[in-house]
Image: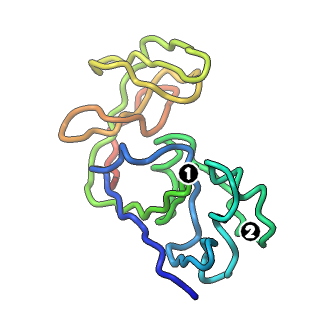
Amino acid sequence: MENFFPIAHITWKQFNKINFPIFPLPSADIYSEDGLVRLRETDRVIDDLNQLGNTLGLRRLSSPHELQRIPRYCGDSIDFYHTRAKAYIDNYGFIFVYERTVFTKVIFSEILQVIDKGTFTILKVKGVSFPVRVDRLTKFKWVGMLQLLGHPWIPYEYSTGYCKPLKRKI
């Protein structure tokens, strides 16, 4: 029997609930049946909750069912905000719809120092009072920081030089 599958609706206010990496889904029209989370339009399995494993990848690898192809992933906020998908699934099977609700500025600042920590990188950015943690090492000299309530929040994109402020809906 087909069951409604609960999908969370998230805005920038709940951004901290997102566990990267996340995977864009082609649609939010999802249902659950016998422990299988399926995409309605293709009837293919997104997640097989009957399989052992704590992560989406382990459950998908061991599933005997026809799986919905998930060709891309978002490893961080930069990938995420450049994706136009509406629905996502995280590495643990949490499915959500991200709603862009507010316009904000992206202001470019110079990267003063890049500190490689092995599994992540710390950026010291001019005009930003906190260290900016990113997942990948960068050779760029400028970073565009999303502004939240007039203050730097998270990285949006990198640049080789200064760029004029942008306006984006987050």
* Residue situated furthest left in the rendering: 149
Pinpoint residue 86: horizontal percent, then vertical percent: 47, 65
In the image, what residue occupies the spot 36% across and 43% down? 16
- Residue at 19% x, 37% y: name it: 150
145 or 9, nearer to the observer: 9
Foreground of the two, 70 or 85: 70
Residue 77 rendering spot, x and y as whole percentages: 46, 42
User: Disc 2 on helix, strand or loop?
Assistant: loop
Vertical comparison of 45 with 102: above or below: below
Q: Which of the two discs, 2 and 1, sits closer to the camera?
A: 1
- The residue to which callout 1 is attached is 92
Q: Amino acid at mark 1?
A: Tyr
Give the residue at mark 2: 67
Marks 2/1: CA–CA distance = 16 Å
Query: Which comes before the other along the chain, label 2 or label 1?
Result: 2
In this orientation, which residue lies closer to the viewer: 131 or 68? 68
In percent of width and height, residue 29 lies at 51, 78
Q: Residues within 10 Å of mark 2 (few under 14, many from 20)?
A: some
User: In the shown orientation, is residue 56 left or right of residue 164?
Assistant: right
- Quadrant location, the N terminus: bottom right
**Residue 19, how many percent across, how many down?**
48, 44
Whether residue 156 is situated above or below residue 129 in the rendered picture: below
Q: Is residue 4 above or below residue 141?
A: below
Which of the 4 quarters of the picture holds residue 23?
A: bottom right
In the displayed orientation, state which residue is furthest to the bottom: 1
